[in-house]
């Protein structure tokens, strides 16, 4: 399994997961031009998207979701208008996209039917979870000891409180229907990671109330405080402007580029 976070943050979110020829896109809050440009640079095209999942109906996740055919589009109840009933995702009910298992989890955010996703192939499992104010005990049971985590680490509380944002907005972000702080995210990961865990990608960082250095430093401090070694776990930070990849993408990237060159040669 490989994953590519095409964009992550308040200006737009989109993530592509690919395994054995099957691609799943989570959210499309960026322009289609940027989406396909970034996919193309990775060796993918629109034809590699077999399923599109929407986490919730905020514009930084939903903006261009309507450009996809509803035959491959799935979301929570009322998150997309006039979505066919069979494509409305029911939390904790398993779905299939070819060989991939998808489990939607109900999360806590001030949006319509917000969801996180657990995606599993025959050997590995990935969590995609952003835009939630807290993580329930029920959800913790579903996300324990996975291989890959794309997890929200939205803000540093002190940095947030020092911004010029109005107090009602700060309260919203800090609330149970807001976003996870660096500290909450790190403590959560201390609780749920296990011997299978290979990579943790911190996502949806606030540009005003967080930064890569602060998020990683918080993680390091809390893991040391909890006496948890992460020497064998790769921890990285998703970006608003550039693609951040993980999983086994290095194993398959060369083959995709070789295939592209062969197609180009035949076309020529």
Image: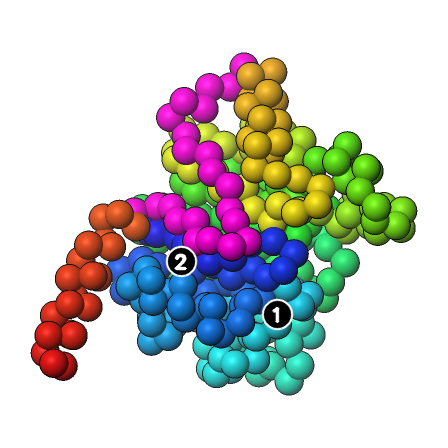
Image point 24% across, 55% down: which residue?
253
Image point 47% across, 68% down: which residue?
34
Image point 41% across, 30% down: which residue?
233
Q: Residues within 10 Å of mark 1 (few under 14, many from 20)?
A: many
Left or right: 96 with respect to 239? left
**Please, what secondary structure does the residue beneath circle 2 have?**
strand
Asked whether 8 or 181 is in front, the reply is 8
Q: Position of residue 91 (x, y in %)?
A: 60, 60
Residues drawn in magenta: 227-248
Asked whether 75 or 243 is in front, the reply is 243
Q: Is residue 136 magenta?
A: no
Image quadrant occupied by the C terminus? bottom left
Q: Residues within 10 Å of mark 2 (few under 14, many from 20)?
A: many
Image point 55% across, 53% down: which residue?
240
Q: Position of residue 229 (x, y in %)?
A: 46, 19
**Please, what secondary structure does the residue beneath circle 1 have?**
helix
Left or right: 184 with respect to 95? right
Question: In the rendered image of this protein, does residue 235 appear above or below residue 251?
Answer: above
Label of residue 17 in the image: 2
Asked whether 165 or 124 is in front, the reply is 165
User: Mark 1 = which residue?
Assistant: 62
Q: Is residue 231 magenta?
A: yes
Our reading of the magenta stretch's main secondary structure is loop
Residue 55 shows in the view: no
Query: Contact, CB < 8 Å: mark 2 with mark 1?
Result: no
Q: Position of residue 232 (x, y in %)?
A: 38, 26
């Amino acid at each position: 399994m490989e994953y590519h976070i095409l964009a992550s943050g308040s200006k737009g979110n989109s993530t592509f997961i690919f395994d054995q020829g099957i691609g799943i896109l989570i959210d499309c809050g960026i322009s289609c031009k940027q989406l396909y440009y970034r996919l193309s640079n990775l060796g993918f095209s629109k034809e590699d998207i077999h399923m599109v999942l929407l986490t919730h109906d905020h514009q930084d996740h939903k903006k261009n979701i309507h450009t996809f055919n509803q035959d491959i589009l799935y979301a929570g109840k009322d998150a997309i208008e006039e979505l066919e009933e069979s494509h409305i995702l029911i939390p904790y009910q398993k779905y299939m996209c070819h060989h991939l298992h998808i489990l939607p989890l109900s999360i806590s955010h001030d949006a319509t039917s917000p969801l996180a996703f657990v995606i599993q192939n025959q050997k590995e499992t990935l969590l995609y979870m952003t835009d939630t104010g807290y993580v329930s005990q029920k959800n913790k049971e579903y996300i324990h000891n996975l291989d890959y985590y794309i997890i929200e680490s939205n803000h540093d509380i002190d940095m947030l409180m020092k911004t010029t944002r109005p107090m009602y907005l700060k309260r919203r972000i800090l609330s149970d229907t807001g976003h996870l702080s660096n500290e909450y995210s790190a403590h959560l990961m201390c609780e749920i990671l296990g011997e299978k865990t290979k990579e943790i990608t911190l996502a949806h960082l606030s540009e005003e109330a967080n930064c890569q250095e602060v998020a990683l430093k918080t993680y390091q401090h809390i893991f040391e405080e909890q006496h948890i070694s992460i020497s064998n776990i790769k921890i990285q930070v998703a970006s608003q402007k550039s693609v951040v990849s993980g999983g086994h993408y290095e194993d398959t990237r060369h083959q995709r580029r070789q295939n592209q060159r062969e197609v180009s040669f035949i076309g020529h």
